[in-house]
Image: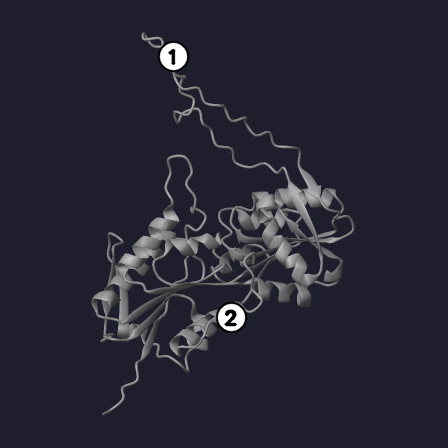
Amino acid sequence: MTKVRQKTTITRQNFTKVRHKMTKKCTHKRDKKQRIKQNKMTKTRVDVKESVRGQTIFIIQTIPRDVNTAIMELLVMAYALKTSCAKNIIGVIPYFPYSKQCKMRKRGSIVCKLLASMLAKAGLTHIITMDLHQKEIQGFFSFPVDNLRASPFLIQYIQEEIPDYRNAIIVAKSPAAAKRAQSYAERLRLGLAVIHGEAQCSESDMADGRHSPPCVRNTTGHTGLELPLMMAKEKPPITVVGDVGGRIAIIVDDIVDDVGDFVAAAEILKERGAYKIYIMATHGLLSADAPRLIEESAIDEVVVTNTVPHEVQKLQCPKIKTVDVSMILAEAIRRIHNGESMAYLFRNITVDD
């Protein structure tokens, strides 16, 4: 009886560094194996050029600026592989899109849950991603999700690239980011500061029916139900909890997209005496005028990983620096391919990380 070894194929989508890491372990023949086309109406079509029956497929999909097109490509590609009888279809998505839309707001929708259901229906059986906006998002999926962490790479950057980092203090730009900041502070043995009271986008309730008039006394004499009224929140003046005077301020977060909050936080920290300000984040979306705003602000450096392409933004703003995390993604692919444990990649990772 001849033993047939199962082959793993990786389909490449822009994340070329992972490809180089895995060249010796897996085959890469995208031009021959699979072709993605878009017709004049921008409809996506995928042709699988050779048999994938019984194979394990890794789809590496980086999310570019056109998020919806990238998602549709991923769905169509996964479904094409599913209908071609692939055994396992594993999506490697360094930045999971729509992760901020993971909570119900008024009459909105939890888009992240919808996307998880669509990926499962398309045929994906496993996902490798990095720093989900909320860890509870893993519960939206009906298949395994490996949520890798970028914090070891960012902490290493702080230790090696920031002079006199021992005089630094980790800053959370809002109370919601305090847990992440506390994790960095404990690992670097540094102090912690929290910015409290910063302006946030308020939601108007005037037009959604929540201020409908209460029930009135009807003809039978019965009164309507009277419910206690929730008091409106009053935001305190912006304050910094912690001493940042004469220190290097390092603001940590998971996503840098609209940098308005970071610029405002940097100005407050400068007023409080911080002499250098760094921004550390996993996903550098840097939308719209983010490069210009960073260049004109009090921020000294913005450090992000390469989970999202941002070469154009780096050309526009020399303050933007990149940390390469392809090594851990490649190792995750190798371990899954060889059936090895993933626990090594989560050493010393706690629930709050």
Q: Which amino acid, mark 1? A: Val
Q: Residues within 10 Å of mark 2 (few under 14, many from 20)?
A: some
Q: Which residue is mark 2?
A: 345
Q: Residues within 10 Å of mark 1 (few under 14, many from 20)?
A: few
Which disc is residue 216 wearing? 1
**Which quarter of the picture shows residue 31?**
bottom left
Side (left or right) of 255 relative to 167: left
Rendered residue at 66%/50% (across/down): 171
Q: Secondary structure at mark 1?
A: loop
- Look at the image and tell me in which quarter the N terminus lies: bottom left
- Coordinates of residue 270 in the picture (x, y in percent): 72, 45
Rendered residue at 54%/27% (across/down): 232
Q: Secondary structure at mark 2?
A: helix
- Coordinates of residue 337 in the picture (x, y in percent): 38, 76
Question: Does residue 139 show up?
Answer: yes
Q: How is the image coloured?
A: one colour
Q: Is residue 161 above or below residue 299?
A: below
Whole-number angstrom distance, CA of label 2 to CA of label 1 = 62 Å
Rendered residue at 76%/58% (across/down): 167
- Total numbered badges shown on the rendered structure: 2
